Amino acid sequence: MGVVSTELEYLAPWLRPPFSDLGTCQTKPDQYCKEEVHIQDVGGLICRACNLSLPFHGCLLDLGICQAKPGQYCKEEVHIQGGIQWYSIKGCTKNTSECFKRTLVKRILQLHELVTTHCCNHSLCNF
């Protein structure tokens, strides 16, 4: 009982012919094509959106991604108390006035909270 070549290709994908050159994608029977899509090719700035990200745990309230409009940036807002980072919020800015700010929030009978905002302008830079 022999094995048909299509069954062999299905069972052993490493026996398939190599990918063709990028940009010369042909549709011959024994030739496969590989196309690469980069995030920059999609258009616009894509940022990570997360309502609650904890150090050493990552994003707990994940909103997925947001797409920044022209003139907007990706941002990460870090909340620090007693010199320790408690949590951060990630997303897209509404305008440039949100970027690179430091705010000291004074609380009665508690440690003061420092809030810093960092902005960046390439896709998924606030990951």
Image (cartoon, rainbow, N blue to C red):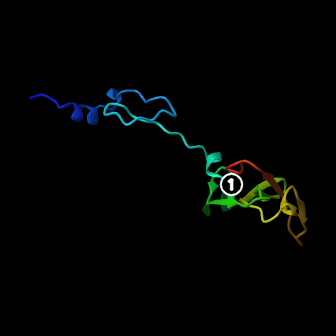
Relative vertical location of residue 72 with respect to residue 28 in this rendering, above or below = below
Q: What residue is drawn where x is 40% and y is 27%?
A: 18
Q: What residue is drawn where x is 66% and y is 49%?
A: 56
**Percent position of residue 86, x then y:** 75, 58
Quarter of the rendering containing residue 90 = bottom right
Residue placed most toward the observer, 60 or 76: 76
Name the outermost residue toward the bottom.
Answer: 108
Residue placed most toward the observer, 56 or 10: 10
How many circles with numbers are drawn on the protein? 1
**Percent position of residue 98, x then y:** 84, 62
| Residue that badge 1 annotates | 44
The amino acid type of the residue labelled 1 equals Gly
Relative vertical location of residue 2 with respect to residue 94 in this rendering, above or below = above
Q: What residue is drawn where x is 76% and y is 50%?
A: 121
Judge the density around disc 1: few (<14), some (14-19), many (≥20) Cα neighbours within 10 Å: some
**Percent position of residue 57, x then y:** 63, 53
Q: What residue is drawn where x is 17% and y is 32%?
A: 4
Q: Secondary structure at mark 1?
A: loop
For this view, does 44 lie left or right of residue 17? right
For this view, does 33 lie left or right of residue 22? left
In which quadrant is the N terminus drawn?
Answer: top left
Quarter of the rendering containing residue 88 = bottom right
For this view, does 2 lie left or right of residue 22? left
**Percent position of residue 70, x then y:** 76, 59
